[in-house]
Image: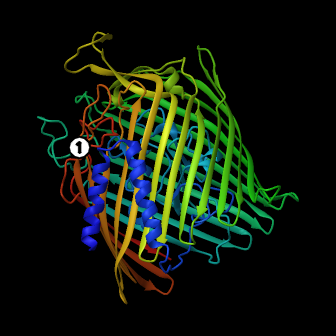
Amino acid sequence: MLCYNIILGLLFIRTVLYMSHYQFNLAMCGILLISQHSYAGSEHIQELDQLIISTPLTDTTANTALPVSILSGDELRMKASSSVGETLKNEPGISSQSFGPGVGQPVIRGQTGSRVHVLQNGLGSLDVSSLSPDHANSTEALWAEKIEVLRGPTTLLYGSGAIGGVVNVIDNRIPENVSDKLFSGAFEQRYNTVNEGKSSAFKIDGGKGMLAWHLDGFYRDSINQQIADNAVEGVDDGGRLLNSNTRAQSGTAGFSIIGDKGFVGFSINHLDNNYGIPPGDEPDEEVRIDLKQTRYDMKSEIKQPLNFAESLRMKLSYTDYQHIEIENGTAGTVFSNEGFESRLELIQKPWAFFDHGVLGVQTKNSEVSAIGEEAIIPKSDVNSFGFFTVQDIHTENLMYELGVRVEQQWIDPVGMKESSHTPVSFSTSALWSVTEEDSIKLTFSRSERAPDIQELFSNGAHLATSSYDIGNAGLKVETSHNIELGIHIDHDWFQADFNLYQNWVNDYISKNNNGQFFNTNTETFVNNCVGAGCLPVYQAEQQDAEFHGFEAQVKIPLLATDYGHLDSEIFADYVRGQFSNGDDIPRMPPLRYGVQLGWEGFDWATQLRMTRAEKQENPGLNETETDGYWLLDLSANYRVAIAEYADMLLFVKANNLLDQDIRHSVSYLRNSAPEAGRGAEMGLRIEF
């Protein structure tokens, strides 16, 4: 019976691709209503819900109306990778936009760049990752205690226009509590066969009296990664992706002074990251990126500062970022971003008919520049000021959350006219607790996003991306209207989450291949070009667009014994994006679905995961299709006590066991840089 249900579920998911989104919405809602009726009488074992750190309203995953995904604990440790995108790529609705192993940007529901805000402890990274797909995000997830992916009203706490969502990487670099131990921490060592990758990392936390402190650091190094087939048809590259080796190191130190009325803390982090860009249309050119960033953070909280306030929180961050694009061993274009970001949040006590609320302001001031032959953007001062509020209302079976954000952005490029925009966004969501175990969430938002500097002012050849980029100084504010329905079923023998969403975007900004080429030999734009020196032209354009899709997870326990339990999971996600003229939006992820089996005992756990990604037959104008693939992964870990106060976690992850030639449709280098072939990562982690 179980096998029948799994097969039936997979067949149902497969048919979605051939249904209109209206038919799909009706079918899914009908099935969910039947499921709700069938499982209402089941006995339920209540599990503890995770606290959402990213919202100041002290919500848990069970009592919030906002859509949220949380990765923490051993699950996060097993999924942790060299980039945020790679760490999250198996989460519902999330893909990784790789540009070789050194870059992995998260793609949420087909959105990336500035439509997905990647934060470190609630503040932006102030790097230049949104300027170009070959620029790595400087936010590291290796020592994260938790990664939260938010959508809905709470995204307005961190910026407007986050249609995809907010990814908040949370660590303990500024402690908020004094540890009961003078010293505690962890050491981790990993080795990956696919690229002979070696990584070492440590963290130490401690505290005494009113002082708490934190140290961490890591080093990783790898050679060119193995691939299942030649990167480019007809070119023998020895089974490895050329120029894909990486080397990175980082160190962090932080401390806090903590008392009964609050705390204040400081931290400093330095990151060096050197990675290669796999050859694209210019195979004779070798491009590397040498990235350096120093970041200073301050965080504080005052409890009960006013009669009507629970706390006042402040965060400050100063970042000095620079990376050099090294072309054939010679330093080329230098990208830099030196900036300051601040946040002030006042968490309110219950007032009027609101149970909780937060008021806040956020500022960003930065100087962005690109100096060199490929300076595709002018040196610019970028400043923004935002006011935001999120409030919630609770009744017996219903909860509502509302958010508003008003933002002003100025971009002042050297030698060009200043650009100014005022995006205004609001969002509301409702949670209906149908029973103690089951709930329905409905979210609506209207988000405005100001165009970025590269969308406005790019103009030039960019060798790292093998493209010629053209901006549009006349771009207007982008406006998105989004609606989402979520259904959560939570019983001891059946758990399920379904999310359906529809986005209508006015004046959607996209980077499109216009079909022309820039001939670097003649420095002219041509309609036809063959051989070296031909760069496709990508132009920033604006027109109305529409997205719709879904995410689904169904978990079914299979076996419970005195030694552990065996569980199964069926999962799927899908997004479709089209412009108003009927053209496909480029670089959308395909339909994915699959099955996972997991065993968890007292000391050890193992998972077998099979994912099917369908062929992307709607790649966008002048873009190429990508074939479907099967991805089989296996992981296992074993925890053992090695001393009275120390544990050791041994783990192994076997990836792409079928050695498939995987090319992601969201990647700009899908034709020349496939994903890693068959490999295994093994390691140990000692915690004390």
318 horizontally vs 471: left or right = right
Q: Which residue is more in the foreground, 102 or 643?
A: 102
345 horizontally vs 605: left or right = right
24 lies above or below 606:
above
71 lies above or below 322:
below
Residue 77 lies, in percent from the top left, at 43, 65
Q: Residue visible at 87% across and 57% down?
A: 306
Residue 10 can be seen, yes or no:
yes
Q: Residue visible at 43% across and 74% down?
A: 686
Q: Residue visible at 23% across and 43% down?
A: 241
Residue 38 lies, in percent from the top left, at 43, 71
For the N terminus, which image quadrant?
Answer: bottom left
**Total marks in image:** 1
646 lies above or below 204:
below
Residue 473 lies, in percent from the top left, at 54, 18
115 horizontally vs 352: left or right = left
Q: Which residue is more in the foreground, 615 or 81?
A: 615
Q: Residue visible at 53% across and 32% down?
A: 336
Residue 90 position by quadrant: bottom left
**Outermost residue, bottom direction?**
562
Q: In this figure, which residue is indicated by the disc labeled 1?
A: 241
